[in-house]
Image (tube, grey):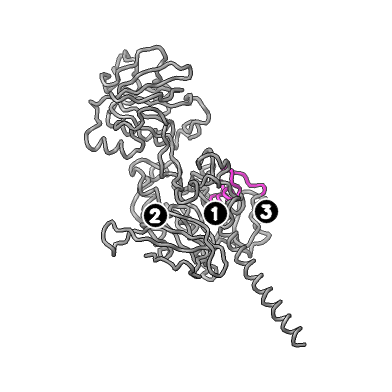
Amino acid sequence: MELHNKDAFSEDILPVVIVGNGPSGICLSYLLSGYTPYFSPDGFHPNPILLNKLRENRNLSLFDQDLEYLCEGVEGRSSNPVAVLFDALLLPDGDFGVDCASPLIWRHEPERATPHLVLGKGPPGGAWHAMEGSMLTLSLANWMELPGLKLKDWMRDKRRNLRNDRATPAEIASYYQHYVSKMGLEKSFACGTTVTSVSRASLESGRSVWKIQGLQRRASSGEGIEVPFSVYAENVVLATGTHDIPARLGVDGENLPFVCHSFWELEAAISSGRLDRASEPLLVVGAGLTAADAVLAAHHLNTPVYHAFRRPVSDPALIFNQLPKLLYPEYHKVHQMMSQQQYKVGETVVNLSNQPLSSPADGTSPCTCYPGYLSFPKHHVAAFRPDGKCVLEDERGLQTVLQVSMALVLIGAHPNLSFLPEHGRPLGLDSEEPISCRRNPLDVDPYTYECVKEPGMYAMGPLVGENFVRFLKGGALAIVCDIIQKQRKKRQEKCTRSLNFQLTNCTLEA
């Protein structure tokens, strides 16, 4: 869809504009397009309290029910109650790995559809199109799917097989792009768009609306040409995710050429031959899943790896200590490496470049399990030096200097909210800190996802602390329910004003 500039006093106002076309924006578009969830006449749910509540109003859609009431007594692995509720309805007993049938049925009711626009930089699927294509997703396949199209069925049609009930990011990205086409949502998607400003605007009629401005790449305008656009909306939804800006350490030398901040730079170094089995070790900084993927990728190619992270290996908050071993064998392997081959303070650092690539049968090597790997728990980077050296420091202040060929800092990412005043800081739980999925998400009403400090602006997905596709779908439900309530209230007020006007005229005539 090509966008056009609207006149500064245009009355052509969209009810909803969604910034972000990843799974959050796609799911919200699906619900806004008239796809409506109902409790099935023969539906069952293992939670007896929720089951009884659903039976009370079995003829009403979820959009017409009291979400706060339905949320009571439902527990799950999210701090957002509507996310837990919708997950429980889409994936009953999902935490136990049970593939129970959902008690919901979906009806397409076009009369319920709310006109909306979804803006995204790339094709539908968002950041999933930029993720490494061969690693398996953390979530089970059915946790990644969106309502109305089972991922397993789509994979079967594509003659692809799931490994340990998990798919690759490339497959997930393809699924999301197909989903938009399959569900007929394409008419609401404007891809190739970069939003540069979201601000309040007062129209000639006195209405206060949102003005969304940006640039759109258009094939008809020549390659690389970006055309300005502006649209107006009653409500705006932030669904941008948090993969835009890699987090940085903030230490000396971090801008040196050998210090990188994305997995893709590792892939490029491997592809170009700049990093191989004969290289000085690669330093991976971080203890998340992306850091683990980097360790696995380098180890697979026999590239030596130093691995530094702040937490102890046994820390319960470490993601590896929360994953079932049978479902995630590759991450369990990395956790074993982190645990079994730790650097001991005071010892001479093993020269991994000179280490044999396979373990000797007699077990004489100091690192017999995983040659070419050494972990540095409870260490942080103190500085990078121009000669390719990295200074690590432990919790007691003792320093270790490592010679590396490349340093890969993978400690998370921040959302790009540059289109908002002060990068969105005033909307966070702590208005003095940058917006962060883990530490400072946007402050929203738990049952509507409307920003507490900015009425008419909503947020969902990672911006409100939901990192898993499984739980971000609840945000879509909450937002649609609230917008429907607003529209219903507006119609009632309009009818009341009309009735009062008629009564007034009748009185005057009498």
Q: Nearer the viewer, mark 3 or mark 2?
A: 2
> Which of disc 1 and disc 2 is earlier in sequence?
2
| Type of amino acid under label 1 | Tyr
Mark 1, secondary structure of its residue: strand
- Check residue 69 in the rendering and tell me which mark sits there, or answer none: 3
Q: Is residue 329 visible?
A: no
Mark 2, secondary structure of its residue: strand
| Quadrant of the drawing holding the N terminus | bottom left
- Check residue 194 in the rendering and tell me which mark sits there, or answer none: 2
In three-dimensional space, the C-alpha distance between marks 3 and 2, rounded to whole angstroms, equals 39 Å
Between 410 and 171, the one lying in front of the other is: 410
Residue that carries the numbered disc 1 in the rendered image: 458
Between 450 and 453, the one lying in front of the other is: 453
> Which of disc 1 and disc 3 is earlier in sequence?
3
Q: Residues within 10 Å of mark 1 (few under 14, many from 20)?
A: many
Direction from residue 256 to residue 473 in the image, left or right? right
Q: Position of residue 283 (x, y in %)?
A: 34, 27
Residue 136 sits in quarter = top left
Numbered disc total: 3
Q: Is residue 404 visible?
A: yes
Q: Nearer the viewer, mark 2 or mark 1?
A: 2
| Type of amino acid under label 2 | Thr
Q: Nearer the viewer, mark 3 or mark 1?
A: 1
Region in magenta:
72-94
